[in-house]
Image (tube, rainbow, N blue to C red):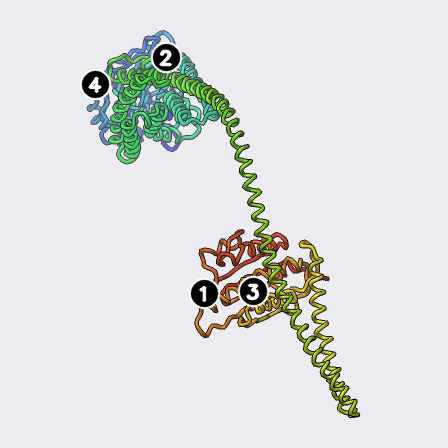
């Protein structure tokens, strides 16, 4: 694009009614402007006329650059340059005679990195017989301002790889182009302002520039564009293909390889300028891309080192070199940070790390080939392609190789493309090797499995024979165990029955004693009545008859008590073990408490204990098996009285045996607690008391089945709980929890 030098929207040079011929020399045009009153005595216009005279006077003292070839030419001389050390000079300053005399003739002048701004002054002539548009390529310059005169105006065009893409004079990829139309034989004076911002990829080596016909430039760019598109297509196809493989295999090497492909695509598309052309609608994209390009080299290096570590399995095979590679990754991160803090130091450090990384990776590749590591040859060949491409660019920049389309445009993309293709082959070959190893491993496993299966058949036969023999032995042992268990259970039942019988006998003995005693008394009273009647003393006889009547009532009452006990026992014997009926737990607890207590008293008349009862009168009869619950109570009561007797035997004077029975309702469940102040249960035995055949009593005094059967009756037969709390030497408390379902 171009911009005329203007003020307040109007041209600073006016032209009168007389038409100025196109081929009249510049000074004559300026004279005509003065004669026609174009400047109207305006001092600013005089100043502008002076600058124009000074600007176009270069045609009188400098030989124009002849543009006469149809091929691009590199212009390294025939122009002069000015070092703008401050970077603040304007076009007006440059046209000032003071600065004009400071221009230096150029002759392949190298770029000085300490000077960011240069001014070039030259004239060009279309030395052909055709009107043409010429392209000036100021490669690698960040900002370019191009000044030239046309139709009595000073025009300005802008470009540069950091300049907004849409606003460039001739936007094409990342090229720094200025388009200048020249008629056949026309000479044009030009002044150019060049600005360089130091960048890894964009370093102007000299002040030289290129000039070529637009048609040739467009043809060359079209051809190179096809080549670059081919490379980008390779990267895209390889990325998609290997992405599917990564999704299938989830190999870490493929993940790093995809990142390598991404960066290869990024640098190829970025250096060729296609990324900028795609996102050119964003004015700051060129700057953003340049900033990211600085750190992207470090990211690519880190990703590539990670790929090498993973692909060549460096961590397992070469631990020392793996640590060296980890150190390189850390240094790459540090240099990346330095780029944002002190660019030149970070850039130099990145270059040194690159020089150190290349021989190290080549060494690891060669050593892996020597160690016959799968795919190491493909990896080394691919890396050699990349290294060759980079080496071509370096040698071209050093002037060892000529600068042409291959060394400048295609060497690095070609090396990258061949590398990613060879890496794809390497990864595919690695998968094939792994597949073959897995197949061989599976074949060995199958063979081993068949051998094991045959061995298993042989062992099974032997085991079956041994199992059969062992089974016979176990059956015999089991039968003996069952017989012994049945005997123990019968013994426990007989013991319980003995206690029950003793208690019942004692309960019946009391009313029978009363009956016998009162019967003897009544016999004596009858004899006394007979004697009194013989005496005729009816009054005394009536008194004796009244005593006889009271005694008969007592006999009847005690006889009824004995009859109730007998009926209860008959009813108890008729009930099955699993038969449940509505039963009052308070009465059942009291009845079996007295049976056990009286049975114990019948054996030991000196035994005594305080019996405490706390029965909840609101408890209604609930469904349970009285005989089974009675057996539980017999066992728990019997154990409690045994603990009391043992403590009384061991204790000194002052010990008062106590046994308390309590019933209450809790959360719609029936709770029965039996607590004694006996010897308690040792803590190390507490978790064993429900085991069959375990007892704390001396040998011969217990079978070890009482609490085992009680636990089974409560938990399985009645879906309840049996808990115990104890402290050795102080107390034991059993808690029976049963479902409570009174009649509606």
Can you say whether 228 is above or below 612 in the image? above
Within 10 Å of the Cα at label 1, are there few (<14), some (14-19), or many (20+) other Cα atoms? some
Q: Which residue is mark 2?
A: 213
Q: Secondary structure at mark 3?
A: strand
Q: Secondary structure at mark 4?
A: strand
Instruction: From the viewer's side, name the closer residue of 218 and 523.
Output: 523
Of mark 1 and mark 4, the one earlier in the sequence is 4
Q: Which residue is mark 4?
A: 105
Is residue 314 left or right of 445 when viewed as pictured?
Answer: left
Q: Which residue is mark 3?
A: 674
* Residue 326 percent coordinates (x, y): 30, 30
Within 10 Å of the Cα at label 4, are there few (<14), some (14-19), or many (20+) other Cα atoms? some
Of mark 3 and mark 1, the one earlier in the sequence is 3
Of mark 3 and mark 2, the one earlier in the sequence is 2
Instruction: From the viewer's side, name the closer residue of 458 and 57.
Output: 458
Within 10 Å of the Cα at label 3, are there few (<14), some (14-19), or many (20+) other Cα atoms? many
Alpha carbon distance from label 4 to label 3: 121 Å
Q: Which residue is mark 1?
A: 729
Q: How many marks?
A: 4
Q: Residue at x 60, y 59 (%)?
A: 496
Which of the image's four quarters has the N terminus? Answer: top left
Alpha carbon distance from label 3 to label 2: 116 Å
Tell me, for residue 173, which label it has, or none: none
Alpha carbon distance from label 2 to label 1: 116 Å
Which of the image's four quarters has the C terminus? Answer: bottom right
């Amino acid at each position: 694009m171009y911009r005329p030098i203007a003020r307040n929207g109007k041209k600073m040079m006016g032209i009168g009614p007389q038409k100025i011929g196109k081929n009249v020399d510049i000074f004559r045009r300026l004279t005509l402007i003065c004669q026609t009153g174009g400047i109207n005595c305006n001092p600013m216009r005089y100043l502008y006329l002076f600058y124009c005279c000074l600007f176009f006077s270069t045609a009188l003292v400098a030989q124009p650059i002849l543009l006469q070839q149809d091929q691009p030419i590199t212009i390294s001389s025939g122009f002069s340059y000015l070092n703008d050390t401050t970077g603040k000079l304007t076009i007006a300053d440059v046209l000032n005679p003071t600065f004009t005399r400071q221009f230096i003739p150029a002759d392949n002048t190298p770029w000085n990195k300490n000077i960011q701004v240069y001014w070039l002054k030259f004239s060009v002539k279309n030395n052909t017989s055709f009107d043409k548009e010429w392209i000036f390529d100021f490669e690698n310059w960040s900002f370019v301002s191009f000044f030239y005169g046309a139709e009595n105006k000073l025009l300005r065009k802008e470009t540069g790889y950091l300049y907004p893409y849409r606003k460039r004079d001739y936007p094409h990829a990342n090229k720094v182009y200025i388009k200048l139309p020249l008629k056949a034989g026309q000479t044009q004076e030009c002044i150019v302002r060049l600005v360089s911002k130091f960048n890894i990829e964009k370093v102007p080596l000299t002040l030289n520039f290129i000039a070529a016909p637009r048609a040739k430039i467009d043809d060359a760019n079209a051809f190179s564009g096809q080549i670059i598109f081919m490379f980008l297509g390779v990267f895209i196809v390889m990325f998609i293909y290997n992405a599917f493989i990564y999704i299938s295999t989830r190999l870490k090497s493929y993940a790093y390889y995809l990142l390598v492909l991404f960066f290869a695509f990024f640098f190829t598309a970025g250096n060729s300028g296609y990324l900028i052309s795609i996102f050119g609608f964003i004015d700051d994209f060129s700057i953003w891309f340049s900033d990211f390009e600085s750190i992207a080299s470090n990211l690519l290096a880190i990703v590539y080192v990670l790929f090498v570590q993973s692909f060549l399995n460096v961590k397992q095979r070469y631990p020392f070199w793996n640590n060296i590679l980890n150190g390189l990754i850390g240094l790459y991160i540090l240099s990346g940070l330095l780029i944002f803090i002190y660019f030149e130091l970070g850039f130099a450090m990145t270059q040194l790390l690159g020089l150190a990384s290349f021989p190290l990776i080549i060494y690891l590749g060669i050593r892996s080939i020597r160690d016959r590591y799968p795919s190491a040859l493909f990896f080394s060949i691919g890396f050699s392609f990349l290294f060759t491409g980079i080496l071509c660019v370096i040698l071209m920049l050093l002037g060892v190789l000529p600068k042409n389309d291959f060394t400048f445009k295609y060497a690095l993309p070609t090396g990258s493309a061949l590398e990613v293709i060879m890496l794809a082959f390497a990864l595919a070959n690695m998968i094939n090797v792994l597949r073959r190893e897995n197949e061989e491993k599976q074949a060995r496993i199958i063979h081993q499995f068949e051998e094991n299966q045959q061995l298993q058949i042989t062992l099974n036969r032997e085991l079956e024979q041994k199992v059969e023999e062992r089974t016979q032995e176990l059956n015999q042992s089991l039968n003996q165990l069952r017989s012994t268990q049945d005997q123990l259970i019968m013994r426990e039942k007989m013991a319980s029955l003995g206690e029950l019988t003793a208690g019942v006998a004692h309960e019946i003995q009391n009313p029978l004693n009363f009956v016998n005693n009162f019967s003897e008394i009544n016999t004596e009273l009858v004899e006394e009545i007979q004697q009194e009647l013989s005496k005729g003393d009816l009054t005394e006889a009536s008194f004796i008859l009244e005593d006889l009547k009271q005694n008969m009532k007592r006999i009847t009452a005690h006889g009824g008590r004995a009859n109730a006990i007998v009926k209860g026992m008959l009813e108890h014997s008729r009930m099955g073990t699993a038969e449940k009926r509505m039963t009052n737990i308070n009465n059942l607890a009291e009845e079996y408490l007295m049976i056990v207590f009286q049975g114990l008293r019948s054996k030991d008349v000196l035994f005594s204990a305080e019996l405490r009862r706390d029965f909840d009168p609101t408890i209604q009869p609930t469904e349970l098996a009285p005989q089974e619950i009675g057996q539980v109570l017999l066992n728990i009561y019997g154990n409690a009285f045994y603990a009391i007797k043992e403590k009384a035997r061991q204790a000194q004077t002052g010990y008062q045996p106590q046994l308390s029975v309590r019933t209450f309702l809790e959360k719609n469940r029936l709770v029965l607690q039996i607590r004694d102040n006996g010897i308690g249960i040792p803590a190390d035995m507490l978790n064993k008391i429900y085991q069959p055949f375990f007892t704390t009593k001396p040998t011969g005094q217990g079978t070890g089945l009482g609490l085992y059967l009680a636990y089974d009756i409560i938990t399985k037969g009645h879906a309840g709980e049996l808990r115990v709390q104890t402290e050795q030497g102080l107390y034991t408390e059993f808690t029976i929890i049963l479902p409570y379902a009174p009649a509606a």
